Amino acid sequence: MQTSLRSRQHSLIHKLANCIEETWQTYLDLSPYQVPEDLGYVEGCLEGERLVIENHCYQTPQFRKLHLELAQVGNSLDILHCVMFPNPEYALPIFGADLVGGRDSISAAIADLSPIASDRSLPKNYQTALSSLPVIQFAQPRALPQWADIFSEFCLFVRPIGTPEEEAFLTRVREFLTLHCQIASTTTPLISRLEVAKVLAGQRYYCTKQQQNDKTRRVLEKSFGSEWTEHYMSTMLFDCVA
């Protein structure tokens, strides 16, 4: 298991990165994913501080790309980003999680199983399972940005305060992940071209919306310029299947 960058990051990022990879290894049949040679490990400079990005990717029969990104800016900013892109033959939601914070606290923590259906609804088996999870109260819930109509009603977006809330967030993400991997591993692939086309359309909509995230784009553009940022966001972060 890769530990180089996460061992220097906030403890919740370290724990969540391990949790994600351990859950993948437990429930899915992982194989290597070919990361573009210039994007696996990236170094740059942001406002005088060193910026490091590590990308870890895998694939499975059900998922065309499992992506875990870890990033760090000097001693002031730690980032975790994770997305599980299903193969278009599987009508599965898109799992995503992000953590942003410094050495002492996490300012933003989000996790969701985002629907790809045109009516923005999750499959019934997901709705049933997620509805049965106990409600978790956080002191500082956060509002989603205006572009974020891609998220489900079960989306968790908070600023976790202290160790108990950090652990509660970690537990909920582990529940999301475990449920998702268990359902995916028993899901039958689609055979209808029309149904596959609907899945592709839903995934493209998700990627298009995520690419509108101005905060991510601004940070990358300051360090690497607009051309590289567009390449990275459309190739590494939110690549759409043609």
Image (spheres, grey):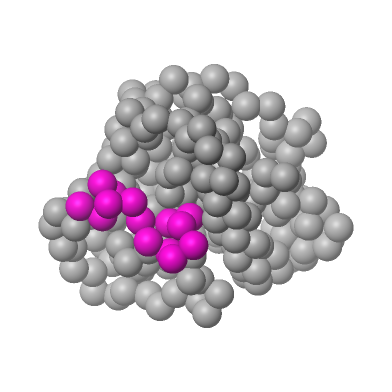
Residue 118 part of the magenta segment = yes
Residue 9: image location, x then y, percent: 48, 47
Give the quadrant of residue 14: top left
- Describe residue 159's horizontal placement relative to residue 238 as left or right: left
Residue 199: image location, x then y, percent: 54, 48
Identify the residue at image location x=67%, y=48%. Answer: 240
Looking at the picture, does residue 38 appear above or below residue 154?
A: above
Give the quadrant of residue 108: bottom left
Residue 40 part of the magenta segment = no
Q: Nearer the viewer, residue 31 or 64?
A: 64
Q: Nearer the viewer, residue 188 or 182?
A: 188
Looking at the picture, does residue 106 appear above or below residue 70?
A: below
- Describe residue 12's horizontal placement relative to residue 39 as left or right: left
Identify the residue at image location x=72%, y=60%. Answer: 220
- Describe residue 23's horizontal placement relative to residue 200 as left or right: left
The C terminus, quarter of image: top right
- Describe residue 135's horizontal placement relative to residue 89 as left or right: left
Q: Which residues are magenta?
A: 114-128
Q: Is there any visible trace of residue 129 in the rendered image?
A: yes
Identify the residue at image location x=31%, y=74%. Answer: 141
Identify the residue at image location x=16%, y=63%. Answer: 135
Residue 158: image location, x then y, percent: 35, 68
Tally of marks? 0
Q: Main secondary structure of the magenta part?
A: loop
Q: Is there any visible trace of residue 4 in the rendered image?
A: no
Residue 90: image location, x then y, percent: 47, 37
Q: Nearer the viewer, residue 38 or 230?
A: 230
